[in-house]
Amino acid sequence: MYQKADQILSQLPPEHKGDLLPAIRKEFLQEEKTVVVFDDDPTGTQTCHDVVVLTSWTVALLIRELKKKPSILFILTNSRSFSKEKAVALNAEIGSNLNEAVEQTGRKIIVISRSDSTLRGHFPHEVEVIANTLQLTQAVWILIPAFIEGGRFTINDVHYIVEQGELVPVSDTPFAKDNVFGYSHSNLKDWVEEKSGGKFKASETIACSLDDIRIGGPDVLARKLKSCKPGSVVIANATSYKDLEVLAMGVLKAEKFGQQFLYRSSATFVSIRAGIAPGKILSSLKQDDSGHGSLIIVGSYVPKTTSQLAYLLDQKKLESIEIDVQELLNSRATNKSDSIIKQTDDWLASGKDVVIYTSRELKTGSDAESSLFINSSISSFLVDIVKGITVRPSFFIAKGGITSSDLASKGLSSETALILGQAIAGVPVWQLDSKSKFPEMIYIVFPGNVGDSTALYTVWNKFKSPA
């Protein structure tokens, strides 16, 4: 039996009073910096609006974007779908290119390694290579997994997910059993030691407690942060936007004493670090007048996605195609992509809405590498389908982080996208660039672990084609 979230939250000290965002924004603008986000899957954009995400990172492209002096710039690495070695090499390449772009533009940057609020990802390896590549070896690392929109809270150093009104320690959830990124600790100090193989000791990891944040405020945080040794790890407790605002202000104050910071964060903190309120729920989209149907592709296999897909299919409002993953892995389904493409084109052209989804039985390998290979094979098959489709959907929903990244960059050949806002809390809406396969199409990135059982249907129904 878990603790009731409302009961525990009501027992915490009152939040810090006052609106800190205007002051954070003022300081941020005076510094003339850009928050550059290394995003290990595209769901990191789930709290931002009116910012650009890049799926490519050539020096020329980075220079072009930094010259625009944006407050926030996302670089989609999709590294959560790669092996540790490939993820490290990728982050090193991006860091090197970013270094050159910074030197040529003179634009100062703040670096966030954005990752999963359920603690899946290549930690600490990605943060280490970013620090080494971008001359941030003296920086203090701040770990901020709290994702307010999704009910992911850190209290007394323990990270929780709110499920059915209860605080569930994250190590008790299916995410902790991930075949690639599994872990056994919910206490973040212990988690840091576990994931670093003992390099960072739990006893040496520093915590910014909720007492520090809510009773002490920015000045207390600043004193604690400025006293941290270079390269040390700090965990941030938080259950609200206000907690993260206090943290951001404490960071700004500590920086005035010469302290450097490098962040490993969930999505919520990104906007707040730039002094921008997170979240912009879109009430509607500009309607596509083609008369074509919409397209949903579901690759995520987590239980939450499975329940959302089941609810969507139960409504019997979309045509559906199931891809048998076992057949695909046995190479018996590879020749089926042509028939799937033709059927999808026919349905879309006639105004019918289509959902293509992978079979729900989770297929894993004997180790992390083989599991990643399975994921990659499935994603490649979905990419081939999107490459083959010739009829432009009225809008496109991609379900799952790896799925949505590969479909955007490889399937739709999109190099950049504009983040318009959110369909619902935690579900970002992109507008693809003019050079993509379907120029300026609306592309909804739906994380696998966000929303209740009706959420996928709710988002589709909200924006569906009039046809």
Image (cartoon, rainbow, N blue to C red):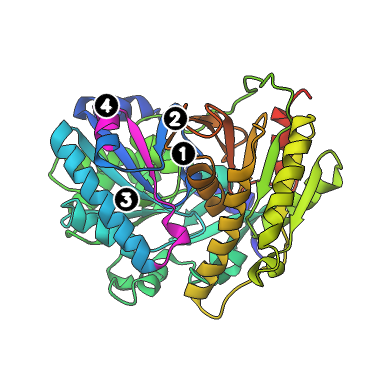
Residue at mark 2 to residue at mark 1: CA–CA distance: 9 Å
| Cα–Cα span, label 3 and label 2 | 18 Å
Q: Front-most of 104 and 410?
A: 410
Q: What residue is pinned by disc 4? A: 69
- Quickly name the residue at label 1: 241
Q: Along the horizontal axis of the image, is 316 left or right of 49?
A: right
Q: Position of residue 105 (x, y in %)?
A: 17, 31
Cα distance, mark 4 to mark 1?
Answer: 26 Å
Relative to 450, say whether 414 is above or below: above
- Please report whichever mark, 2 or 1, sits nearer to the chain's N-terminal start: 1
Q: Is residue 435 left or right of residue 109?
A: right
The residue at which mark 2 appears reads as: 277
Residue type, label 3: Tyr
Residue 108 belongs to the span the image colors magenta:
no
Residue type, mark 4 in image: Lys
Write down the region rendered in magenta.
Answer: 62-83
SS at mark 1 in the image = helix
Give the amino acid type for the residue marked by disc 2 in the picture. Answer: Ala
Q: Is residue 154 left or right of residue 392?
A: left
Residue, x 21% and y 61% (percent of image)? 231
Residue at point 35%, 43% (across, down): 37
Dot 2 and dot 1 residues touching (CB under 8 Å)? yes
Residue 57 is situated, as x and y percent measured from the top left of the image, at 32, 43
**Is there CB contact under 8 Å for labels 3 and 1?**
no
Label 4 or label 2, whichever lies nearer to me, is 4
Mark 4 to mark 2: distance in Å?
19 Å
Q: Position of residue 198 (x, y in %)?
A: 31, 77
Q: Is residue 82 magenta?
A: yes
Q: How many marks?
A: 4
